[in-house]
Image (cartoon, grey):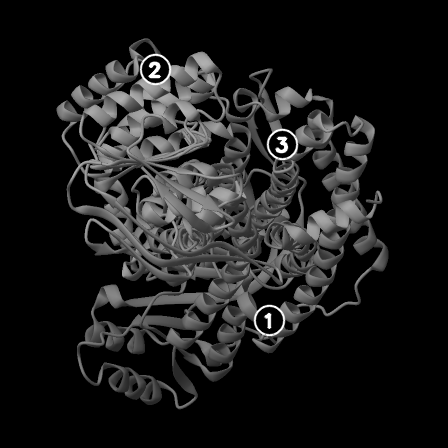
């Protein structure tokens, strides 16, 4: 037997195990490469988005998710490779012992299995690189066809080679240790059940039920290959953390941010204004998902003024609380420096840089505002006060500590009392009291009215349209529901990309679990044969194997879901919007992942249970 | 030979194993019967088909052709669930290589065939105690198989085979791997079981056992050559 023919033959003889390790390795490399290339593109898009689309408030929720999911996917890749290679080598520990017992020198034994490791690592990493590049290309095309703008750039060959080399070296590093350890162990020890099974003496014989007995065997088997069990639990734990962050975080963050959008724009809201103002206001809203496209408009033009008569008629028709008169103006705003308490000295500290920028300034009647923004701080209190609530993007771009600072507009100074998440003008917006704005900007009338349309009463919208047309033929009534749906749809599609990323890792983890179950079966072949020979039916054997699979799966699941939930709720989303339906949705997704993995892991058990007893006993 | 019903009846029993392209005929048209309470030995050189015959009688394997009836049941036609229940209730099998479950203690190894039958905890505990006393291993109750000597493992295998008090005991080379002192203990155990009224089929070369049996079936190259009394 030549030094190369043995490793090749050994790998070919264990077709299923070999292909499992190669595929799992390939998926790890592919998912990591895919993440680095594809999510990098999303990451780039995110930075464009901050400038053009999505407000800063949304981006600050989105970016940590992408970064965390990225870190977790990389972690999953490392742990999985470590597990798969470890598993591959541990299946050969007894063989190594036997070969040494038969007189094969340690360095030759080590050489055989190192060659096997090299072959598997090379093929797996190569396949992974091909899969990762193909996956990136396919998914980018798919997302672009769905309306996303993801750049289709040529792959950087050197980067791909770097990823290949990193994973190849990693596979060798984690794989060499078990082979080296086994090659150093004395033959008697390598073949000894005490070394191999790691059993300990029990205290007292207790008779248990049949199901308890099945559980006992399953549990002991976990300890029997405790090293592999710990690795697979760790691997599944990280994967489920990733899935929980991806799914639970994605769902919660999606609903939370959709909720912000819905409350900020409002459901069943219509705007009444001059045609020009209506068009521009819609463009201001669409900048959230399409980028800035509005045209310059002199908002103070008298043609755009809403008469007191029209307002009164609307209030009479719809009720006072359903009419929200606003004055919108685009103007220069200035950051005013403020004082805050220093961390160490307990003295005051100057904050702010006196930055200047253009912002949409909206005058509102605080008591009649129909929007319910997600706010830090509070909303402006009274009609004529000099207080302002600024949008999240404006706060991010122009203020250091907005809630202790003032802002200036039209030479008037306003206390910043709140920061709101608002899709209007993509968060570059300032809300001040209507009367104050009219006074400082020297404008007498509002130029836009928002009204809530009562869907339960027929003809409300038509009545509003009639009133608007009667006041001025150039006035229009535009319902905002479609824009609201598009804004929420955009937020939803951004989150779905995040939720999509853990799928690769989940598949690779399922293969790892399959590998673990095969390892468990391999080590217990003889025992299962004996059990069946003395009266256990195939179902009992399936129950024992599935019990082992379920034990590691549930351990990883509990660990991962707990960590994932903590990360999601405590670190990633502030004030999450969680409903009963959200919890059900998350539980549903996570349960589907768990059940699918468990069902797939049963395949080797079902296959094994069909084997004749003598085949099983002879194989062992 | 004692009188009684046929417990085992084999007619034109053949077993062929396919190893790649090679066909190996392990049993060739074997015809034999074993009566109730009979103590029968199966002897013959290594590779003559002794273990295969025991496997077919125990329902662990199925014949390629021919018929094997045990306790009136034609095993060739039965499915795996029936055979599992049959092995659990009717047959006690002592394997040549002991075949104890390495993750279970001595007591658990003896108890688990009873647990397949869902017996209550008290009766299992009592029966385990009783069997441990029979095989003289009360002091080894919590030990794992790898902590026992070969003879002790063989005795645990006997205790496990007797757990459900099966009427038929199939024993494969019980003294093959043991020293003479331990072999003597196993022979004494077999004698005790024979006196207890079990039907015993034992595959062996051991003259000491052959001298105890009612009848010896001599196999050679898969053929039944003689049935000496």
The numbered mark, 3 or 1, whose residue comes first in the sequence reads 3
Mark 1 crowdedness (10 Å alpha carbons): few <14, some 14-19, many ≥20: some
A23 or A329, nearer to the observer: A23
**Which-is-in-front pick, marks 1 and 2?**
2
Identify the residue at the far top of this view: B139
Q: Tell me the number on the disc at residue B142.
A: 2
Would you say the residues marked 1 and 2 are in contact, meaning their CB atoms lie under 8 Å apart?
no
Percent x, y for residue A325?
Answer: 36, 67
Q: Does A286 sit left or right of A18 as displayed?
A: left
Q: Which mark is residue A143?
A: 1
Q: Position of residue A26 (x, y in %)?
A: 67, 54
Identify the residue shown where x is 57% and y is 65%: A330
- Residue matched to label 3: A94
Does residue A294 lie above or below A499 as drawn? Answer: below
The chain under label 1 reads: A
Query: Dot 2: few (<14), some (14–19), or many (≥20) neighbours within 10 Å?
Result: some
Cα gap from disc 2 to disc 3, whole angstroms: 26 Å
- Tell me the SS state at disc 1: helix
In the rendering, at what x and y percent does residue B124 appear?
A: 18, 26
Evaluate if marks 2 and 3 touch, with contact meaning CB atoms under 8 Å apart: no
């Amino acid at each position: 037997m030549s030094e190369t023919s043995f490793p090749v033959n050994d790998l070919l003889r264990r077709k299923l195990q070999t292909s499992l390790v190669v595929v799992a390795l390939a998926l790890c490399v592919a998912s990591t490469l895919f993440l680095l290339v594809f999510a990098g593109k999303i990451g780039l898009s995110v930075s464009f988005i901050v400038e053009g689309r999505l407000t800063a408030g949304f981006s600050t929720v989105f970016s940590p998710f992408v970064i965390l999911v990225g870190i977790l996917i990389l972690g999953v890749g490392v742990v999985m490779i470590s597990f798969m290679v470890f598993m591959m080598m541990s299946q050969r520990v007894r063989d190594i012992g036997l070969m040494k017992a038969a007189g094969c020198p340690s360095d030759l034994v080590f050489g055989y299995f190192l060659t096997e490791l090299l072959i598997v690592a090379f093929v797996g990493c190569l396949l992974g690189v091909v899969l990762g590049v193909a996956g990136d290309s396919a998914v980018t095309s798919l997302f672009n066809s769905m309306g996303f703008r993801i750049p289709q750039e040529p792959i950087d060959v050197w980067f791909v080679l770097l990823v290949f080399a990193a994973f190849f070296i990693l596979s060798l590093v984690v794989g060499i240790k078990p082979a080296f350890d086994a090659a150093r162990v004395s033959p008697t020890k390598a073949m000894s059940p005490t070394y191999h099974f790691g059993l300990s003496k029990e205290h007292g014989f207790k008779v248990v039920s049949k199901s308890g007995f099945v559980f006992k065997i399953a549990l002991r088997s976990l300890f029997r290959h405790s090293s592999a069990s710990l690795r697979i639990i760790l691997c599944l734990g990280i994967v489920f953390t990733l899935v929980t962050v991806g799914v639970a975080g994605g769902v919660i963050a999606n609903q939370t941010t959709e909720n912000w959008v819905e409350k900020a724009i409002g459901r069943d809201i219509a705007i009444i204004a001059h045609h020009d103002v209506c068009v521009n206001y819609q463009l201001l809203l669409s900048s959230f998902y399409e980028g800035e496209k509005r045209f310059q408009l002199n908002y103070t033009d008298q043609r755009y003024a809403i008469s007191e008569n029209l307002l009164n008629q609307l209030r009479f028709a719809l009720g006072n609380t359903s009419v929200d008169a606003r004055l919108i103006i685009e103007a220069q705003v200035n950051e005013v420096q403020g004082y805050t308490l220093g961390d160490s000295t307990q003295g005051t500290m100057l904050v702010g840089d006196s930055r200047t920028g253009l912002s949409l300034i909206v005058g509102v009647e605080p008591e009649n505002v129909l929007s319910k923004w997600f706010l830090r701080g509070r909303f402006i209190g009274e009609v004529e006060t000099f207080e302002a609530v600024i949008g999240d993007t404006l706060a991010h771009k122009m203020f250091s500590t907005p809630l202790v600072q003032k802002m200036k507009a039209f030479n008037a100074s306003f206390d910043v009392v709140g920061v709101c998440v608002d899709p209007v003008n993509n968060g570059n917006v300032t809300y001040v009291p209507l009367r104050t704005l009219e006074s400082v900007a020297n404008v007498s009338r509002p130029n836009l009215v928002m009204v809530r349309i009562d869907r339960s009463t027929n003809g409300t919208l038509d009545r509003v349209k009639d009133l608007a047309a009667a006041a001025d033929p150039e006035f229009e009534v535009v319902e905002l529901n479609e824009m609201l749906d598009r804004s929420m749809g955009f937020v939803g599609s951004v989150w779905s990309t995040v939720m999509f990323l853990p799928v690769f890792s989940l598949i690779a983890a399922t293969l790892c679990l399959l590998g673990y179950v095969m390892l468990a079966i391999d080590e217990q072949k003889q025992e299962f044969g004996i059990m069946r020979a003395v009266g256990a039916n195939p179902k009992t054997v399936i129950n024992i194997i599935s019990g082992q699979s379920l034990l590691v799966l549930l351990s990883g699941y509990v660990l991962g879901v707990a960590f994932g939930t903590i990360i999601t709720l405590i670190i990633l989303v502030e004030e999450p919007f969680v409903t009963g339906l959200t919890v059900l949705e998350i539980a549903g997704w996570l349960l589907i992942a768990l059940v699918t993995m468990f069902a797939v892991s049963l395949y080797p058990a079902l296959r094994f249970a069909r084997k004749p007893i003598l085949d099983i006993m002879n194989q062992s | 030979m004692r009188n009684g019903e046929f417990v085992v009846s084999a007619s034109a029993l053949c077993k062929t194993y396919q190893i790649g392209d090679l066909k190996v005929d392990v049993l060739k048209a074997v015809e034999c019967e074993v009566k109730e309470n009979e103590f029968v030995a199966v002897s013959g050189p290594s590779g003559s088909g002794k273990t295969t015959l025991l496997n077919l009688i125990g329902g662990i394997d199925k014949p390629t052709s021919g018929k094997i009836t045990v306790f009136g049941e034609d095993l060739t036609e039965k499915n795996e669930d029936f055979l599992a229940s049959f092995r659990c209730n009717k047959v006690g099998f002592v394997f040549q290589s002991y075949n104890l479950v390495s993750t279970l203690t001595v007591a658990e190894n003896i108890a688990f065939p009873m647990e397949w039958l869902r017996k209550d905890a008290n009766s299992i505990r009592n029966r385990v105690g009783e069997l441990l006393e029979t095989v003289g291993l009360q002091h080894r109750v919590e030990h794992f198989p790898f902590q026992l000597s070969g003879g002790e493992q063989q005795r645990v295998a006997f205790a496990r085979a007797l757990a459900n008090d099966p009427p038929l005991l199939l024993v494969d080379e019980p003294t093959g791997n043991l020293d003479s002192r331990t072999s003597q203990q196993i022979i004494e155990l077999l004698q005790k079981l024979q006196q207890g009224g079990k039907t015993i089929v034992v595959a062996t070369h051991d003259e000491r056992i052959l001298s105890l049996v009612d009848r010896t079936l001599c196999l050679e190259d898969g053929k039944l050559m003689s049935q000496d009394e």
